[in-house]
Image (tube, rainbow, N blue to C red):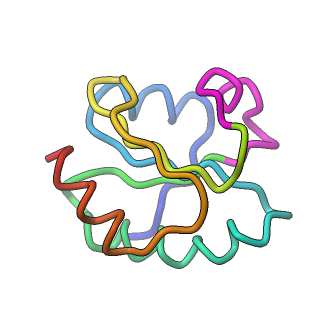
Amino acid sequence: MSAIHFTPEEFNKTISESPAIVDFWATWCGPCKMLGPVIEQLADELEDKIPVGKLDVDECREIAMEYGVMSIPTVIYFKNGVEVKRFVGVQTKEKLLDAAKELE
């Protein structure tokens, strides 16, 4: 399973219903392109456990502003609709997986 490409509606529904991991990114962002394959691997490894998705900050400016995303890539972990952890910049799959254990 690959990462979900969130629309605003899907984003709001997903984070309110279950734990979720969201990569705030943009198509023009070099570091975001580096993190992209890691997010896809994370989605594969967490399949059926935690939804993992990407939110394009250019398409969803209001959501990025609401969560104070100032730099991309930013990966935010949500539980019960609330942010519980944030990583800014390119991260390793291992670091992101370790942090996901807190959501389960």
Q: Is residue 44 left or right of residue 7?
A: left
Q: Nearer the viewer, residue 64 or 56?
A: 64
Say which residue appears at 45% left-offset and 69% top-offset.
Answer: 2
Measured as percent of width and height from the top left, residue 36 is found at 59, 71
Is 11 rendered above or below residue 89?
A: above
Highlighted range, magenta: 56-69
- Quarter in which the N terminus is drawn: bottom left
Image: 14 above or below 103? above
Magenta residue check for 58: yes
Instruction: Please determine whether, in this image, residue 15 is positioned above or below residue 93.
Output: above
User: Is residue 28 shown left or right of residue 60?
Assistant: right
Residue at image point 59% right, 27% down: 67
Tell me residue 86's x, y (percent). Answer: 45, 43
Q: Does 20 appear in magenta?
A: no
Q: Is residue 97 left or right of residue 25?
A: left
Residue farthest to the right, as pictured:
28
Residue 38 percent across, percent down from the top left: 48, 75
Q: Residue at x 48, y 68 (%)?
A: 39
Query: What residue do we see at 47% from left, 62% from top?
Result: 3
Locate residue 9, reporting x and y percent. Answer: 56, 28
